[in-house]
Image (spheres, coloured by chain):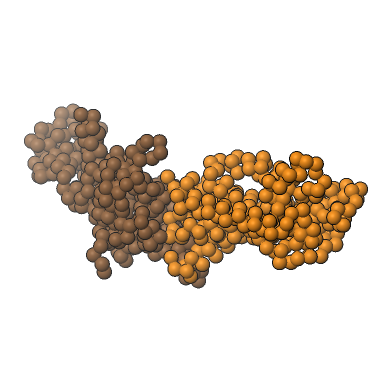
């Protein structure tokens, strides 16, 4: 296997005709086989970046290479390696899922016989085979999203780009989509995922870039990023409620949510024993405990808000 | 992509277009059949009987090639403009734009589909005309070449229209305000010899006149314009519009941001 990165973006810039500067010199590298999260608030430049990678948007300057092939100078060769699941539904609602998949393969020059076999395989894997002959407008929202994944797999891409693939999808279908995408990644396909469900990125992705206002503000491994989070908040569910006065615990900020729930904010290195000792001494019995917020979400908000404060200053 | 891969892609785009034409046959194939039947009844049978002969043919025989050509032109144009604009509007044009397909395959596939619609409608209208009159084809090769060239020219023109269109109204403006007047003034119903000056000379600036007359020459053996001249006009338009269509696709005008 070649050691070329799956994706190398170098100083990519995009200014739209209306003067909006969507990308202000983005550079990043995604290694082969990675499961990579590209996160950012709305309007940060994620879709523009994906648009350039999939040749739907023309870059103003800079370049991007997919497995060493330039998407701007060798468009056709680069596109053969990419599969795209866009954010918006973009298939013909009057066509059947089977035809949509077979036609997509045809656009990549894949013979009809092979295309039909692949369509059956991926529609089956995404639990859409029983809907293969129905007009696609009759599919539910979750089915339409899965159809776009099946379509993107028709050329069996080496790099699969998923732009918010689970938006508006219920948790059961979302989990089945995660399972499918994880399987694809384990089989060797590099995956780039953008999502607003940060727990999704935390669970699935090994590396992460956060983009904001057209710039990459963080690009590291998920592990390293999460290690930056120095404060954790726990939610404690109580058996019999608590009195008006809460015990004082050194290094722990204890707050009441309601009579049967407390919140404890503390350093990640702080031990939990002193908290439980103090609570026991106060006659408070804890029945269960959980992290208050998604860890990545806390970091994401902190990074994006930090960037906004820097700009304002 | 390799030649064989390009051929698979070309077949796919064309097949999808033909599937669309057949899926919505009541919008694509039926209306021209009804409209042209009315033309044959009203202009050919009722009014034509009082007009007499033109270039040695009954009026019905004289207008059949013009009406067939008119159907081919409007349907080739209408097919590609509505289909390609529809794919832009529904965003499924992106299926092709993110693929490795070269621009010429996309253009040829859409033009192929539109030409086939023109041929289907032309065959239907010609078949209906045989219920009203008797025809023999004087020059089969000229007839076929003219049909293919004219359908190609108007398919390419429809494609350019669809690329620039931003809303559905934009694909109706050209057929309503340009194509229909030029077709009616292009010698479908009359010989330009009947026109006084300067209208007679002005008519030669209308490209549809060359198409209608080349086709009439192919079917009946009579024409108001020279065959070579007509073929050159059609070839010139085909080459110029194909170059424009390719340029628009390559630059991504109206398609890529």
Where B13 sits versus A268, above or below? below
**Residue B171, percent from left and from top:** 60, 44
Which residue is located at x 16 percent, y 45 percent? A228
Instruction: Name the residue nearer the viewer: A140 or A13.
Output: A13
**Who is closer to the viewer here, B127 or A284?**
B127
Give the residue at x 42% y 64%. Answer: A155
Residue visible at 14% across and 42% down in the picture: A230
- Tell me where residue B238 sits by quadrant: bottom right
Report if residue A122 is visible in the image.
no
**Residue A76 in view, yes or no:** yes
- Residue A171: percent from left, percent from top: 38, 50
In the shown orientation, is residue B188 left or right of residue A281? right
Spot occupied by residue A9 in the image (x, y as percentages of width and height): 28, 52
Q: Which chain is brown?
A: A
Placement of the N terminus of chain B among the 4 image quadrants? bottom left
Residue B25, compared with residue A115, is above or below; it is above
According to the rendering, which colour does chain B have? orange
Q: Is residue A73 left or right of residue B82?
A: left
Q: Between residue B55 and residue A102, name the one nearer to us.
A: B55
């Amino acid at each position: 296997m070649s050691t070329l990165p799956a994706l190398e973006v170098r100083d990519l810039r995009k200014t739209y005709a209306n003067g909006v500067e969507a990308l202000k010199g983005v550079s990043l590298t995604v290694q082969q086989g990675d499961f990579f999260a590209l996160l950012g608030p709305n309007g940060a430049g994620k879709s523009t970046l994906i648009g350039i990678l999939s040749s739907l948007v023309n870059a103003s300057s800079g370049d991007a290479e997919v497995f060493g092939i330039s998407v701007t100078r060798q468009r056709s060769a680069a596109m053969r390696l990419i599969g795209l699941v866009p954010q918006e539904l973009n298939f013909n609602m009057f066509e059947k899922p089977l035809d949509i998949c077979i036609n997509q393969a045809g656009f990549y020059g894949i013979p009809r016989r092979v295309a039909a076999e692949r369509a059956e395989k991926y529609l089956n894997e995404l639990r859409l085979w029983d809907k293969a002959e129905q007009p696609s407008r009759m599919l539910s929202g979750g089915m339409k999203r899965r159809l776009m994944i099946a379509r993107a797999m028709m050329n069996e891409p080496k790099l699969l780009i998923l732009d918010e693939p689970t938006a508006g999808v219920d948790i059961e279908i979302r989990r089945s989509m995660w399972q499918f995408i994880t399987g694809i990644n384990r089989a060797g396909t590099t995956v780039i995922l953008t999502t607003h469900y940060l727990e999704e990125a935390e669970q699935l992705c090994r590396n992460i870039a956060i983009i904001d206002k057209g710039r990459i503000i963080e690009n590291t491994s998920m592990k390293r990023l999460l290690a930056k989070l120095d404060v954790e908040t726990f939610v404690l569910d109580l058996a019999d409620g608590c009195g008006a006065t809460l015990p004082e615990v050194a290094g722990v900020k204890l707050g009441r949510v309601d009579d049967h729930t407390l919140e404890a904010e503390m350093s990640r290195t702080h031990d939990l024993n002193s908290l439980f000792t103090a609570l026991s001494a106060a006659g408070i019995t804890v029945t269960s405990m959980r992290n208050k917020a998604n860890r990545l979400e806390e970091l994401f908000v902190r990074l994006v808000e930090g960037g906004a404060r820097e700009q304002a200053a | 992509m390799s030649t064989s891969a390009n051929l698979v892609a070309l077949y796919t785009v064309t097949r999808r277009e033909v599937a669309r034409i057949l899926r919505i046959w009541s919008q694509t194939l039926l209306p021209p059949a009804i409209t042209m039947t009315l033309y044959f009844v009203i202009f050919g049978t009722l009014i034509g009987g009082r007009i007499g002969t033109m270039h040695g043919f009954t009026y019905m025989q004289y207008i059949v090639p013009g009406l067939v050509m008119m159907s081919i032109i409007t349907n080739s144009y209408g097919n590609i403009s509505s289909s390609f604009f529809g794919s832009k509007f529904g965003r499924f044009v992106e299926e092709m734009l993110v693929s490795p397909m070269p621009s010429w395959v996309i253009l040829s596939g859409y033009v192929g589909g539109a030409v086939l619609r023109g041929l289907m409608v032309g065959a239907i209208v010609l078949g209906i005309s045989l219920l009203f009159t008797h025809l023999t084809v004087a020059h089969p090769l000229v007839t076929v070449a003219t049909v293919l060239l004219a359908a190609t020219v108007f398919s390419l023109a429809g494609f350019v229209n669809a690329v620039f269109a931003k809303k559905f109204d934009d694909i109706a403006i050209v057929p309503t305000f340009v194509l229909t007047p030029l077709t009616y003034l292009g010698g479908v119903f009359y010989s330009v010899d009947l026109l006084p000056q300067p209208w007679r000379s002005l008519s030669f600036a209308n490209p549809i006149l060359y198409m209608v007359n080349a086709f009439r020459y192919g079917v009946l053996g009579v024409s108001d314009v020279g065959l070579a001249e007509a073929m050159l006009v059609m070839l010139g338009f085909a080459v110029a519009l194909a170059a424009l269509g390719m340029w628009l696709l390559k630059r991504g005008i109206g398609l890529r941001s």
